[in-house]
Amino acid sequence: MPHNAAIVGGGLTEWGERDATWKDLAQEAGKATFDDVDGIEPEDVEGLFVGAVQPERFAFQSHVAPMVAELLGIDVNGMLARTELACASGQAALRYAWLAIAAGQLDVALVLGVEKMNIDREHMPEIQSNMTNVLDREFDGVNGLNGPSYFAQY
């Protein structure tokens, strides 16, 4: 029997160009979320789902979900995962949390999306090249099929 799932709060970081690291952004968003929700603390979280498309390339850091759990004081013995789905990585994280709750595997989950993409200009060509990695490099990329062309056609 499916369980009901609901979004009971949320939090955001400040927008704009900043010197904040990805860890700073994750902590800021997580704290804002806990501040927004009465009665739910980090120790209540049974599952953590982090949407991040390319932290290995942008922040030179992998395994960000366990790090976010540690940063926020979450001791997750249930589910802990990073989702990766290009610009929809956060949406995928939200869906996985919903599925886990609806299946009765969790009661409380935190979903957090984080990406630190604006690094120094010296590495900008590499970063722009990395962004094409969300396409099929062997077909889409070499044939000039990119986001704007898909958006225009479909």
Image: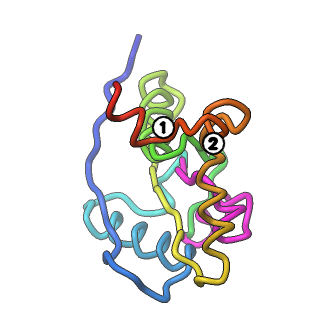
Quadrant in which the N terminus appears? top left
- Decide: is 85 above or below 37: above
Q: How many marks?
A: 2
Instruction: Tell which residue pokes out farthest to the bottom in this image.
Output: 19
Is residue 61 part of the magenta span, yes or no?
A: yes
Task: Report the front residue among 66 and 37.
Answer: 66
Boundaries of the magenta span: 49-72
Residue depicted at 59% across the width and 62% down the height: 128
Left or right: 125 with respect to 61? left
Residue depicted at 25% across the width and 65% down the height: 36
Label 1 crowding class (10 Å Cα cut-off): few <14, some 14-19, many 20+?
many
Query: Under tag 1, what secondary structure?
Result: helix
Label 2 crowding class (10 Å Cα cut-off): few <14, some 14-19, many 20+?
few
Instruction: Give the residue type at disc 1.
Output: Ala
* Residue at numbered disc 2: 78
- CA separation in Å, label 2 and label 1: 18 Å
- Decide: is 109 above or below 149: below
* Residue at numbered disc 1: 92
Left or right: 50 with respect to 40? right
Is residue 73 part of the magenta span, yes or no?
A: no
Query: Under tag 2, what secondary structure?
Result: loop
Q: Quadrant of residue 38?
A: bottom left
Instruction: Tell which residue pokes out farthest to the front in this image.
Output: 143
Instruction: Give the residue type at disc 2.
Output: Gly
Residue depicted at 46% across the width and 56% down the height: 112
**Residue 63: numbered disc:** none
Q: Quadrant of residue 41?
A: bottom left
Task: Report the front residue among 41 and 93.
Answer: 93
- Decide: is 140 above or below 19: above
Residue 43 in percent (x, y) is at: 51, 60
Quadrant in which the C terminus appears? top left
Residue depicted at 29% across the width and 57% down the height: 10
